[in-house]
């Protein structure tokens, strides 16, 4: 198989669920956000928008709502990450979930490539269907019919590097 830096980054990236209490740099954040904007989108329509959140109170509020939706109030589904990137996508686009998901994947791989930990956090859809979520969008000046796709949490990992599980044997079927 062909090997290169991109392929190796994809293979080594693992979800991080423990973060150091140190904020990432603006350059690191901008690098990850930029990678998200280069994700493929259906018909090149660029339906996602990326909302970076580094304000501790806002992250705590998002985490609290997320934990309630998850049925685990009092926990931190954001694992103490100092940065959360919310991915929203134009709900009027049939491919809004796919478009936003690709942006999340690009950002997580970009984070791994520059030494940051990341994790995809679910329940953005439910959060921004609630009045609390809608109020946040209004507060942030985000107008439109957006669907929450997910969060990419970021930070410096406080975990030891994880060994990937072997790939399942029936992952690939080739029809030639």
Image: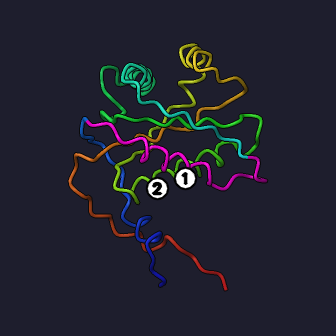
Q: Is 117 inside the magenta-drawn segment?
A: no
Question: Which quarter of the figure has residue 64?
Answer: top left
The residue at the point 41 percent across, 69 percent down is: 168
User: Is 42 situated left or right of 22 in this image?
Assistant: right
The residue at the point 34 percent across, 34 percent down is: 82
The residue identified by callout 1 is: 35
In this view of the protein, which residue sits in the foreground, 129 or 3?
A: 3
User: Is the residue 142 above or below the residue 49 in the image?
Assistant: above
Q: How dense is the environment of label 1, judged by Cα within 10 Å: few (below 14), some, or many (20 and up)?
A: some
Tell me the element at label 1.
helix
Q: Main secondary structure of the magenta part?
A: helix
Q: Which mark is residue 50?
A: none
Q: Is 40 inside the magenta-drawn segment?
A: yes
The boundaries of the magenta stretch are 22-45
Question: Which quarter of the figure has residue 75?
Answer: top left
The residue identified by callout 2 is: 110
User: In which quadrant is the C terminus drawn?
Assistant: bottom right
């Amino acid at each position: 198989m062909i090997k290169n830096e991109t392929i190796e980054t994809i293979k080594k990236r693992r979800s991080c669920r423990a973060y150091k209490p140190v904020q990432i740099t603006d350059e690191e954040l901008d690098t990850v956000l930029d990678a998200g904007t280069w994700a493929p989108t259906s018909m090149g329509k660029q339906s996602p928008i990326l909302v970076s959140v580094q304000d501790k109170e806002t992250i705590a509020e998002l985490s609290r709502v997320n934990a309630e939706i998850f049925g685990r109030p009092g926990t931190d589904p954001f694992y103490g990450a100092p940065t959360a990137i919310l991915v929203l996508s134009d709900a009027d686009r049939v491919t809004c979930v796919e478009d936003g998901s690709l942006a999340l994947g690009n950002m997580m791989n970009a984070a791994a490539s520059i030494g940051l930990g990341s994790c995809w956090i679910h329940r953005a859809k439910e959060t921004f269907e609630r009045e609390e979520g809608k109020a946040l969008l209004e507060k942030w000046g985000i107008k439109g019919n957006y669907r929450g796709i997910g969060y990419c949490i970021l930070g410096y990992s406080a975990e030891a590097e994880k060994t990937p599980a072997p790939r399942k044997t029936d992952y690939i079927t080739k029809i030639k």
